[in-house]
C-alpha cells in the first residue's frame, strides 16, 4: 500500500494493512522458526555424533576446517545474497523484472568465477604451507574446500528466493536439507563401519552442501515470475557493485565474528580448544536462532515498507519481532546457567564439560543480541548499509584484538569474552544509528521512544541500493 504525500489512509484500511503485515511476519517468522528448529536439531545431532565418534582432537580439526571454509565464503559472495534479497524485493514491487533478472544473472556469474578462483588459490597455498606433505590436516582442508563453490551458489539462490518473498522455500535447502543429508551420511558411515576421521567428515560435509545448493537452484528457477522469465535482463553494474561491496563488508564481519574464535584457537592454542569452543558456540546459537528467524522473515517486508513510506507499520513489525526473539531466548540462558555442565557431558561426552564457561558467556552475549532486535537487517533493508558496516566492522576489530590478547591466557573463555563484548558494542552502535537515521527503535524497549508521526519526512521510494 503506497501512502500518497499528505494523504492519510482511512483508519479501517490502515488497520487492515497493519494486521495483514503482522500476520505475514508472524506466519513467515513461525515458519522460519520451525525450519530453524529442524536445522538446530539436525546440526546438534551431527555435532553430537561427530564429537563422540571423532574425539576432541579430530573434531577440533574438522571444526577448524569448516570454520576456515566458512570464512572464505565471505570474499566469494561479497554480500550478493543480501543484495538480492533487498533489491529483488524492491524491483518486483515496482515491476522492474528486467533489473531483477539482470541482478540474478550477474550474481551467479560473478559468484561462480570468484569461488573457483579463491578455492584453487587457497588449495595451492595450503599445499605449499604443508611443505608438499600430504598430511591428514591438508586432506581434510581440501575436502572441506571443495564445498566453497556450492556454498556460494547456494547463497545466491537463497537470496533470490527470499527477494521474491519465498521466505520458507529459500531456507529449506540450507536449514533442513543440508544438515539432514549430513546426519544421514554420518549415520550410514557409522553403521557401515567406516572409520570416520576429519578428512572423511569434511568430505561428507561437502556432499551435503552440494545437494543443498542444487536443490536451492532448482527451487529458484521453479518459482521465478513469468514476467521475469521472459524479459530481457537489464544491468546496473556500478550501483550493484558498490552496494554489494558494502553489504559484503557487513556479511564478512558477521561471519568473521562467528568463526574467528575457532580459527584463532586453532592457530594460537590447540585443536582441542577449537573443538570445545565450537561446541559452546553451537549451544549459544540456540539463543540467537529466534532472532535469526525473525530477521529472515522481516527482510523483504522491511525493504518494501520503507520504500513505500509506511514507517509506522515497519516499527510495529520490528517491535513484535524483537520481543519474540528476547522472550524465546531467556529460558535457554537460564537453563544453561543452571545445568550447562550436565548438558554438555550428557550430549557430547566426557571432556566437553570444559566448554561450560564459554557457553555461558556466549549465551549472555546472544541474549543481548536478541534484545536489540533485528537491527542489522533493518538498516540493510532501508539503505543504511554503510553506517551498519562501520558499526559491525568496529565490533569485528574489537573481537579480533581482544581475542588475540585473551586467548593465550584464558583460552576458550578468552575467545568467548571477546566475541560477547564485540557483539554487544556493535549492536548498541547499530541501535543508535537506527534511532537517528530511521527514527525506528529496533529493540524490545520501544516504549522509551515516541512513535513516528505522519509529519516526519518519508523515505525515498527508489531501491535502497541505487
Image: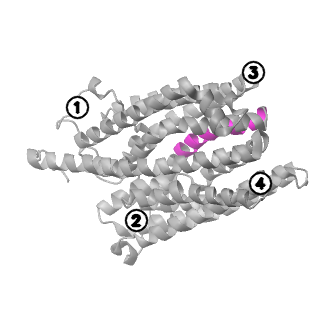
Q: Residue at x 48, y 26 (%)?
A: 334
Whichever of labels 2 and 1 marks the residue nearer the N terminus, that label is 2
Residue located beneath label 2 in the image: 100
Category of crowding for the residue at label 2, using alpha-carbon neighbours closer than 10 angstroms: few (below 14), some (14–19), many (at least 20): many
For discs 4 and 3, the disc positioned in front in the rendered view = 4
- Residue 2 at x, y percent in the picture: 20, 53
The CA distance from mark 4 to mark 1 is 57 Å
**x%, y% of residue 200?**
76, 57
Categorize mark 3 by other alpha carbons within 10 Å: few (<14), some (14-19), many (20+).
few
CA–CA distance between discs 4 and 3? 33 Å
Q: Is residue 53 magenta?
A: no
Residue at 56%, 52% in the rendered image? 78
Looking at the image, is mark 4 or mark 3 earlier in the sequence? 4
Foreground label between 3 and 2? 3
Left of 272 or right of it: where is 3?
left
What residue is shown at x 66% (from left), y 39% (from top)? 348
Quadrant for the C terminus in the image = bottom left
- Residue 122 rendering spot, x and y as whole percentages: 75, 54
Q: Position of residue 182 (x, y in %)?
A: 63, 57
Residue 418 visible in this rendered orientation of the protein: no
What number is the disc on residue 409? 3
Q: Which residue is mark 1?
A: 451
Amino acid at each position: 500500500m503506497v501512502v500518497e504525500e499528505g494523504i492519510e489512509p482511512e483508519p479501517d484500511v490502515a488497520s487492515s494493512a497493519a494486521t495483514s503485515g503482522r500476520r505475514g511476519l508472524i506466519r513467515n517468522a513461525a515458519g522460519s522458526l520451525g525450519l530453524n528448529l529442524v536445522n538446530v536439531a539436525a546440526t546438534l545431532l551431527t555435532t553430537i555424533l561427530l564429537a563422540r565418534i571423532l574425539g576432541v582432537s579430530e573434531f577440533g580439526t574438522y571444526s577448524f576446517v569448516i570454520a576456515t571454509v566458512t570464512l572464505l565464503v565471505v570474499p566469494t559472495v561479497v554480500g550478493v545474497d543480501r543484495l538480492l534479497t533487498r533489491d529483488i524485493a524492491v524491483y518486483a514491487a515496482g515491476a522492474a523484472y528486467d533489473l531483477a533478472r539482470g541482478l540474478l544473472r550477474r550474481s551467479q556469474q560473478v559468484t561462480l568465477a570468484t569461488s573457483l578462483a579463491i578455492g584453487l588459490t587457497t588449495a595451492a597455498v595450503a599445499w605449499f604451507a604443508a611443505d608438499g606433505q600430504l598430511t591428514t590436516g591438508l586432506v581434510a582442508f581440501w575436502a572441506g574446500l571443495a564445498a566453497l563453490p556450492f556454498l556460494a551458489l547456494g547463497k545466491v539462490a537463497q537470496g533470490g528466493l527470499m527477494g521474491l518473498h519465498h521466505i520458507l522455500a529459500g531456507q529449506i535447502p540450507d536449514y533442513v536439507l543440508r544438515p539432514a543429508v549430513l546426519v544421514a551420511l554420518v549415520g550410514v558411515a557409522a553403521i557401515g563401519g567406516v572409520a570416520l576421521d576429519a578428512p572423511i567428515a569434511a568430505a561428507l560435509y561437502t556432499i551435503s552442501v552440494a545437494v543443498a545448493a542444487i536443490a536451492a537452484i532448482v527451487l529458484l528457477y521453479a518459482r521465478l515470475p513469468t514476467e521475469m522469465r521472459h524479459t530481457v535482463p537489464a544491468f546496473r553494474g556500478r550501483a550493484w557493485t558498490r552496494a554489494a561491496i558494502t553489504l559484503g563488508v557487513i556479511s564478512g564481519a558477521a561471519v568473521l565474528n562467528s568463526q574467528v574464535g575457532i580459527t584463532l584457537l586453532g592457530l594460537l592454542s590447540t585443536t582441542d580448544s577449537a573443538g570445545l569452543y565450537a561446541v559452546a558456540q553451537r549451544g549459544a546459537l540456540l539463543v540467537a536462532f529466534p532472532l535469526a528467524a525473525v530477521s529472515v522473515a522481516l527482510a523483504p517486508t522491511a525493504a518494501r515498507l520503507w520504500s513505500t513510506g509506511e514507517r509506522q507499520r515497519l516499527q510495529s513489525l520490528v517491535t513484535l519481532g524483537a520481543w519474540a526473539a528476547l522472550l524465546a531466548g531467556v529460558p535457554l540462558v537460564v537453563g544453561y546457567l543452571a545445568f550447562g555442565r550436565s548438558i554438555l557431558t550428557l550430549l557430547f561426552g566426557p571432556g566437553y564439560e570444559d566448554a561450560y564457561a564459554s557457553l555461558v558467556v556466549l549465551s549472555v552475549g546472544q541474549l543481548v543480541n536478541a534484545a536489540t532486535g533485528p537491527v542489522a537487517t533493518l538498516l540493510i533493508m532501508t539503505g543504511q548499509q554503510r553506517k551498519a558496516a562501520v558499526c559491525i566492522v568496529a565490533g569485528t576489530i574489537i573481537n579480533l584484538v581482544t581475542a588475540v590478547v585473551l586467548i593465550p591466557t584464558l583460552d576458550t573463555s578468552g575467545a568467548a569474552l571477546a566475541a560477547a563484548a564485540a557483539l554487544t558494542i556493535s549492536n548498541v552502535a547499530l541501535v543508535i544509528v537506527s534511532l537517528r537515521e530511521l527514527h525506528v527503535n529496533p529493540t524490545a524497549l520501544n516504549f522509551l521512544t515516541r512513535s513516528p508521526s505522519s509529519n516526519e519526512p518519508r523515505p525515498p521510494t527508489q531501491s535502497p541500493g541505487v
